[in-house]
Amino acid sequence: MRGKVAVIGVGDTEVGKIPEHSATGLCIDAAKRALDDAGLTKNDIDGLVTCNSMAEPHMYHAEAMAEHLQIFPSYCVSAGAGGGTTFAVLYQAALAIMHGVCNRVLISMADSLRTGLTREQAMVMQSSSGHPQFETPYGATVPGYYALIANAYMHRYGVTAEQMAAVAVTARAHAALHPGAQMRTPLTVEDVLASRMIADPLRLLDCSLVSDGGAAVVLARAEEAGDRPHPPVYLLGAGEGHGHEHISQASDLTSSHARQAGERAYAMAGLGPQDIDFIELYDCFTPVVLIELEDLGFCGRGEAGAFVAEGHTRLGGALPMNTHGGLLSHSHPGNPGAMFALTEAVRQLRGEAGERQVADAEVALIHAQGGILSSHCTAILGRDR
Amino acid sequence: MNGKPLPPINPASQPFWDACAQGRLLLQRCGDCGHLQFYPRLLCAACGSRNLEWAQASGRGTVKTFTIIRRAVSAAFEPDAPYAVALVELEEGPTLMSNIIGCDPASVAIGLPVRVAFEGRGEGIAVPQFEPAA
């Protein structure tokens, strides 16, 4: 698959509180922006991938969006694997292109969690990821499920609250350089530690945002990708890994199947961690990033906290991470959240990231996970095939 | 009846929940390979056999990890907040989720020995809970 398919267009909606659009409106807005970026019209698209919205669900979401756009695709799917959805469909869509099912796939995902749901609705809907018989009766929230991981990880490796806070501080520093990010006021470690406890050991600022927003990309065969307005960004590798669905069934609380996903993506790309110029990881909660850094081979076990705290993942460091601000500071509209990591990686590889541009960015690793550190997908993108 | 969620019981789990109502915690044991598992399911998670039987657990375990929920997930849990949610590793091996009840949540720690207790939720349903073994 390496180098066969390229991203030829990207589009982000505004993020944060966007009452002028419903979730459907955001999905279509993102789609239009990506089409414009690719220099295409809707009639050039014959593959459509979306994910369902919590705020404005459709029973058959992709079909509803195709109808809304009045496109008549030969490949049309609404994907659902939580936060991991975004990159799993990236390579599945690439396969559809490679095998001639379709020629150009539009992937557009958006939701309206901030204005489309009440806080209570959002909490209950998100915590419904718990096992209905064996977890939900105990009243955990989504931060609570992740706090179980955080506590085990801190206990095992002696990782500190200050080190976890450094993840949030780094994300905010990068968001401050992104004109569209939801939260741009710089943070300190002290600010994070002073924020209120949500589910021990996770504090408010260890948790990602709740946002309206969405993003879209257009994929096409590498052979035609050079004819578009912006330089193509090639899909070099992708891999999935699935360990459990419910956290009480996890075989290990301090590592995840991000490791398998990463190994599969590296093998497909013929690359390793040492070849990666920058990374966009799934930062729904600060300790998740640390476990991913270890699972994906960038740090030894228990070492990621010090790695981030020492500044290596800041812009200008050895391995810039979440250069748009991530789910912690750019936006988190639910399942579509990692789409912004994808569009950011493409902009970085095109050299269009402005003040936050990673110097000489040639190869990016992006990773998303869904459930409670359950389902993982890694993708590797490059400026060259 | 306190408004907290009731487990949506299915045929595979009915014997488990029937036993909980009688104050007994059951695991499944594979009749072919001897694997012990929780939660109840149709096949052995180790060898895939259908040949599963019920085995009563001792009800003793330790806290593998925990959190203290400061903001209740729903109104039914608000009177309890802050409350502890833990993963408890049974001495037989399987892990399950539980609240840690009968103590100050601040006293819960990884490695804490706990024992099962059952909390009635109405409609003849009791959910397994754990408390410090003391």
Image (spheres, coloured by chain):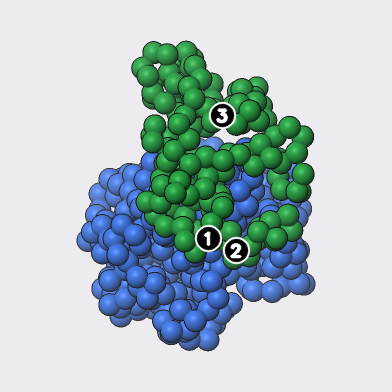
Chain colours: A blue, B green
CA neighbours of label 3 inside 10 A, class few (<14), some (14 to 19), many (20+): some
Can you identify the residue that label 2 sits on? B82
Q: Give percent across and percent down for residue A219.
A: 51, 53
Whether labels 3 and 2 share one chain: yes
- How many numbered dots are placed on residues in this image? 3
Q: Give percent across and percent down for residue A176.
A: 49, 84
Measured along the vertical axis of the image, is residue A296 above or below residue B39? below
Q: Give percent across and percent down for residue A329.
A: 52, 74
Q: Chain of mark 1?
A: B
Q: Amino acid at mark 1?
A: Pro
Q: Residue at x 40, y 51 (%)?
A: B112
Left or right: residue B93 compared with residue A184 = left
Can you identify the residue that label 3 sits on? B24
Q: Residue at x 68, y 56 (%)?
A: B77
The Cα–Cα distance between marks 1 and 2, rounded to whole angstroms, is 7 Å
Q: Dots 3 and 1: beta carbons under 8 Å? A: no
Q: Residue at x 49, y 16 (%)?
A: B53
CA neighbours of label 2 inside 10 A, class few (<14), some (14 to 19), many (20+): some
Q: Give percent across and percent down for residue B84.
A: 54, 56
Q: Amino acid at mark 2?
A: Pro
Q: Amino acid at mark 3?
A: Arg
Query: Quadrant location of the N terminus of chain B?
Result: top right
Residue A92 versus residue A251: which sits nearer the camera? A251
Secondary structure at badge 3 equals loop
